[in-house]
Amino acid sequence: MTRFAALRLALFATFFLSNIPAQGQGIQQVIQGMQARWARIQDASAVIEIQTWDKSKGDKVDVFYGQIYYRAPELIRLEYSPAPESVTGTPKLYPLGENKFIYIHDGRKLLRYSHSQKGWFDQVGNDPVISMVNQITDINNFNVERFLSIYQVADVRSDNSLGIPCYILRAEPKVRGGQHPRQLLWINQRTYLPLEAILARSTNEVSCFFHKVDQNPRLPSSVFSTQWRKPE
């Protein structure tokens, strides 16, 4: 069984066993810890591993690697490329602007950069890739206030499945049947930074792993600007 399949089973188990009392700290205590830590984050960056599972394709899982950049309160830049067929050791990360897929989300709309047309375009529609990117960027896991405006945290439990003491938050969207999926969020118990998020819909699941999270690196404004151009 792949790591993704094991996590998928853990996801369903968490949903179905939601009547088990929370372990460790209570929901409000964990949320307060997240708010206190994340309120100090003006910007952040992380290496991101994305695994997608389209349930209509059986057990096939697509894997991507890239970077995610955040500036408070809502700006997100996400870049990623498909992983090679076989990956050993540290995955190859492309320089800024050289990934196959490049997106900026300003908290209201999603823009995609087209290498072929050398410009930015609004992303709308039901395309699976657009849906996946919207799930990752619109939820904005570095912004607690936005997260809590979208989700009701239904359960918090202690967990060590990632090899680090974590809290797992089970979050249900406040508006059922809307654009936001159900979510499991792994939070480091010491730093209160996100380590993983699983976004679950009836037809697909997206699992995001956050590595090398860098707090307040003082990212230049150009990272989030559509006027940005890749150096020649």
Image (cartoon, rainbow, N blue to C red):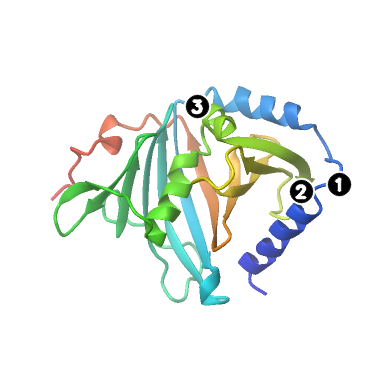
Q: CA distance from mark 2 to mark 3?
A: 25 Å
Secondary structure beneath label 2: strand
Q: Residue at x 78, y 44 (%)?
A: 158
> What kind of residue is marked 3?
Ile
> What kind of residue is marked 2?
Asp
Give the image location of residue 133, x and y in percent: 41, 51
Q: Are marks 1 and 3 in contact (CB under 8 Å)?
A: no
The residue nearer to you, when weighing 198 against 130, is 130
Residue to which mark 3 is pinned:
41
Above or below, comparing residue 41 to residue 11 in the picture: above
Residue to which mark 2 is pinned:
159
Residue 201 lies left or right of residue 106; in this view the side is: right
Residue to which mark 1 is pinned:
20
Q: CA distance from mark 2 to mark 1?
A: 14 Å
Q: Quadrant of residue 93?
A: bottom left
Give the image location of residue 40, x and y in percent: 53, 22
Residue 136 lies left or right of residue 1; in this view the side is: left
Q: CA distance from mark 1 to mark 3?
A: 33 Å
Residue extending farthest to the front is 177
Secondary structure beneath label 3: loop
Q: Are marks 2 and 3 in contact (CB under 8 Å)?
A: no
Q: Which mark is residue 122?
A: none
Total marks placed? 3
Between disc 2 and disc 1, the foreground one is 1
Residue 184 lies left or right of residue 97; in this view the side is: right
Residue 23 lies left or right of residue 188; in this view the side is: right
Between disc 1 and disc 3, the foreground one is 1
Secondary structure beneath label 1: loop
> What kind of residue is marked 1?
Ile
